[in-house]
Image: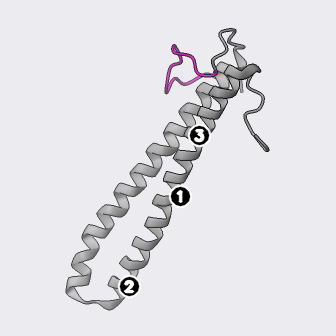
Amino acid sequence: MEGDAFSGFGGGAHHHQIDTKILQTFQKSFVQVQDLLDQNRRLIHEINQNQESRVPDSLSRNVGLIRELNNNIRRVVDLYAGLSSNFAKSMDASSEGDSSGGALRSDAKAGVKRNRPA
């Protein structure tokens, strides 16, 4: 792939299939994040309009809109956490030089913190 940030993952056809799968997963997550951020922008705009209008029904509607906004923010955080975990696993598998050819190993542990030298 042109501009492939993950082109350093091993070699061979098997690695290419795994690299493509990883990239597709990342792309899907980034699209989901962008969709949520776009929706949040629209929600914030509507919340601001309702607040400025001072119409009681509009102000009441803001309660639900703010809940939706908060839920979207939680989903964005979860998506970024998943992306970070998947990226770390991909890099760990790549740097281990896994001879089985897999960029994602079945024994990779999600959410494990590593101590890094200061």
Numbered tag placed on residue 34 in the rendering: 1
**SS at mark 3 in the image:** helix
Residue 15, position as x, y percentages in the image: 69, 22
Answer whether labels 2 and 1 touch (C-beta < 8 Å): no
Q: Residue at x 25, y 81 (%)?
A: 59
Question: Quadrant location of residue 67?
Answer: bottom left
Q: Residue furthest front?
A: 13
Left or right position of 84 against 19: left
Q: Amino acid at mark 2?
A: Gln
Residue 117, position as x, y percentages in the image: 71, 23
What is the distance, in whole Å, between disc 1 and disc 3 at their CAs? 15 Å
Numbered tag placed on residue 49 in the rendering: 2
| Image quarter hosting the C terminus | top right
What is the distance, in whole Å, between disc 2 and disc 3 at their CAs? 38 Å
Q: Nearer the viewer, residue 72 or 8?
A: 8
Left or right position of 106 against 59: right
Left or right position of 72 against 103: left
